[in-house]
Amino acid sequence: MNERDSEAVAAQLVAKGYSLAPSENFADVILLNTCSVRDFAEQKAIGKMQNLAADVRKNRPNVVLGFMGCMAQSRGQELVDKLPDVDLVIGTQKFHRTADYLDEIISGTREKIVDVKAEEKSEATIREHLLNGNSQKSVSAFVSIMQGCNQYCTFCIVPYTRGEERSRTIPDIVNECRELVSRGVKEITLLGQIVTSYGKRDSSLTTHHSSLSPFVQLLEAVHEIDGLERIRFTSPHPKGYGDDLIDAYARLPKLCESAHIPVQSGSDRVLKLMHRGYTREKFLGIIKKLRAANPEIGITTDIIVGFPGETEKDFEETLSLAREVEFDNAYIFKYSPRRDTPAAAMPDQVPQKIREERNQQLLETVNEIGKRKYNSFVGRQTQILVEGPSKKNAARMSGRTRCNKIVLFDGSERHRGQIMDLKITRAGSFTLYGDPAIVNL
Ligand code: SAM
């Protein structure tokens, strides 16, 4: 989501005549888009700004320095007070104002600007795309369908930094997707904090007489777009996996068989303390139904270890859930207390050392299962959408299977944007290697 917000701001500035600097050493404006989900991310952004102030500012006093996004939203004026080199602080509902604020600062009309106010209809302002950011055509794009979150999980700062859930209209989203497809995009990922809550708070957005949830109505509308090959979404909430969404995987061929479903814990006691709204059994039931609808589906998740009050027994239940589901991959987070969230004030905070040990233990379990799953692809034929050169080795091209696994192969620019069949020849760490030449052997 942060990448998407940054891209929209960059595209907006490019439209105003700015160009992308090859690095911060050549930039006249440096904006750090920030995340607040864990304390580490905030400290990293503050450290980076201190370095910019010490290095870049020293040599080029007119460079504009700013923070955007979640930390900008939650800390606001405090950032300017603590870091006097900061000129601009832009909250999560104000990304689209960036160009105007820069004009004011650069022209000297205003010296410093902090804007973290709420703004009506800001959910529909993240719409511009760079697409040709690296002077190459983008094959895959993210489309923001909503902003905010109303779930109020007790560990999470997002409802306070991103505000209440607000959804864009279906025609508005479809128009943006259509425009992207006309510019060569083949795959669209619908984005939101909890996409499965799309449209639930505004009955005017969707058809009332449909038995389908607003999110599935949106999926159907995007599915209609000619030329679009693949649809993905992130991130959903387990509560949003009704039968209509599960059926959509079997019914809508462009909807890729992959699901990132954050489970957070395998213990019912901890899930309740987290205010997640489902049980372990309910979660396992969803996975069973998804695999019945499509046995090839790739399933990934987010898990927090060391939530306040998490006992050894609770953690064992998370380990056993990971073994039972056999996730293709999992993002594991050590619990990080966030300001103003209920969990930060809960008793029995788990010592850092135990959080680290549990993180390591779960990581080993997830890696071991992932290795087995990735190895099972070796020798099989699979279809990928080629996205571009591999980040680590430009001589290789990189694509994704429908179940969201990265596949590398020896290819060239002419493969970009193609849907290709490959035979998987070997598996690395959460990466597959394929060969198009031996596909029919
Ligand atoms: N839609 C997701 C869900 O259903 O929970 C929320 C996305 S959240 C921005 C990304 C992930 O960050 C969460 O799934 C959670 O695992 C992790 N996270 C959020 N708050 C955290 C905290 N205080 N400490 C550690 N990890 C956290």
Image (tube, rainbow, N blue to C red):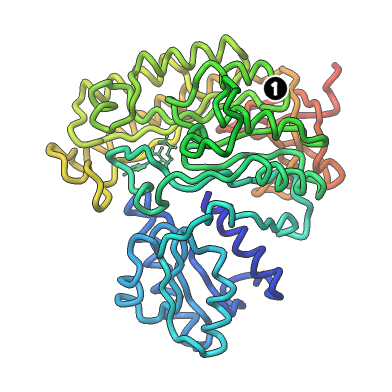
Q: Height in image: 366 above or below 306?
A: above
Picture coordinates of residue 261 (x, y %)? 47, 28
Residue to which mark 1 is pinned: 252
Ligand 1: quadrant of the figure: top left
Q: Quarter holding the C terminus?
A: top right
Picture coordinates of residue 245 (x, y %)? 57, 22
Residue 437 visible within the image = yes
Circle 1 packing at 10 Å, graded few (<14), some (14-19), many (20+), is: some
x 65%, y 20%: residue? 377
Left or right, residue 308 beside residue 289: left
Label 1: state its secondary structure.
loop
Q: Amino acid at mark 1?
A: Leu
Picture coordinates of residue 205 (x, y %)? 58, 38
Q: Height in image: 228 above or below 258?
A: below
x 36%, y 39%: residue? 333
x 59%, y 80%: residue? 28
